[in-house]
Image (spheres, rainbow, N blue to C red):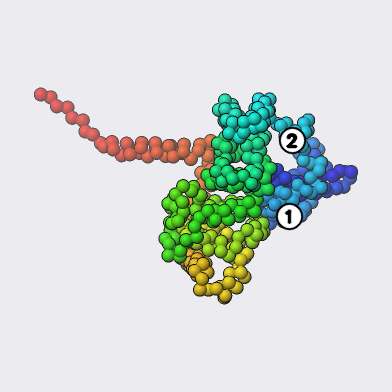
Amino acid sequence: HQTVDILIWDLQYQALLAHRTLSLPPGAPNSHIQLVPTPDTTHALLVVSTSPAKARGSATSLVYSVPLTVPAASSLANAINATHSASVEGWVESDRVDSVSDEGLMTATERQTLDKLDETLRRQGVQAANDVVLQFQQSTGLANLSRDFAAEACKRLLQPLPKATGNAKTEKVPSSVTPLLERGLVSNGCVAHELGVVGAIMDRSDWVALRLCIGQVKDIPEDALVQGLKRVILANPKDFSPTTDRMDVDSKSPPKGQSAQSNAPSVQEFLVQLVQYPTTAGSLRVALKKHLSLDDLAPVLAALDRIIGKELHDISAMSLKDPKRSLFAQSIQFFQHILDTFLLSILSSSATSSAQPEQQQLQASILSISAHVQNSIDMISALEKLRGPLEPFVRAQEERILADKERATRTGHTEQKWAKLRKRGERHRKMDEAVAVYQIEKLVL
């Protein structure tokens, strides 16, 4: 009785999403098995055939149509759900078989450093422990540090702060954690905090580390991202005005009323990172509904209005290779999530309190974003008229590039090498044209 196991993996989060076992009939060949995808991505073809080397006179092949449900993109929610599936057992091998502790993949020097770090934490505190990690980073080199050591070091240095302490607002993230964040060695779940590393950083109000964390850590849940947005809104005064210059997205000057000593990012700066962070629509809407109110929408929509307006006027900033991943498209998508979450609340509040400044500002931002979207539609309609005249040139360019690749594969010459050969031939041709017919005369004096 022969069986074939088909596994669908999420390589980003190293999770087994689905597992299916197919039973093969008796006598079926099993020397060559191949899973062939199809264009519609709803099923695949499983080909079980005899290896050409073992086929003597005739070969046998069986083709099975296997239905598949593959997520459009990798997401943390799918990976978390997959970890609780019973099909994972037997396929996912434990990273630490020989040791129960979390130090199984670290070197002996890293374990000794962690022991010294624990002792220093007990006796001298976080600052001295931070110096221990810094000295080890300088002596070993960041490129040689393991992820397990980085996770354990962050776990000890970013311990949750007591809620009753008065110095929670002044304590910053230890400086040894910053290089670990920059190299992407830290995952969000390595800290014993409800929101992970992001929550520990937000408790310390270290805005520089927070922006670095969102830029480098890839497994931050949507709930933590929206809570970070909420804290940024609270850290900035609510003086966004529809008459403010909407193109000034990259302005570094603090808004009016903001303390000069505060290094909190503006709502625009934080939203630029937030809208580009990979999230799932359902989880993001739940987090928006849970942590934001109608009063918070005014600065958020004003910031989105500025971002969308700038991106619309800066066509070169849009990604031509993947327009869906451009900042303009991602900002529009985030605006759609806000409308899906708060549309009824916005309509009901506009009917009752339309004279309030916050409500007027909210309506002005929505109308402005709608105007930006309409302008983009008009621009796309105008550009669409150029598709027909330019299509032959585009097709010819694609054919030329494909021919150059095939010629490079066949002859071993790259495009750069062909360019040098063409340039050399052009130079020789010009030299030949420069040589004129000379008449030699003999002059006798």
**Residue at image x 63%, y 51%?**
224
**Residue at image x 28%, y 38%?**
434
Q: Which of marks 2 and 1 is nearer the N terminus?
A: 1
Q: In this view, does 350 lie above or below 301?
A: below
Would you call the spot at circle 2 few (<14 residues within 10 Å), some (14-19), or many (20 or more)?
few
| Left or right: 85, with 274 as reference point | right
Q: What residue type is labelled 2?
A: Asp
Q: Front-most of 378 and 112?
A: 112
Q: Looking at the picture, how far across and down is residue 370, in whole percent? A: 51, 67
Q: In this view, does 271 lie above or below 55?
A: below
- Residue on which the image places disc 1: 69
- Residue on which the image places disc 2: 95
For the residues labelled 2 and 1, say whether their Cβ atoms are less than 8 Å apart.
no
Q: What element carries label 1?
A: loop
Q: Is residue 323 visible?
A: no
Q: How far apart are marks 2 and 1 (CA)?
A: 28 Å
Q: Number of labelled discs?
A: 2
Q: Looking at the picture, how far across and down is residue 167, in whole percent? A: 58, 43
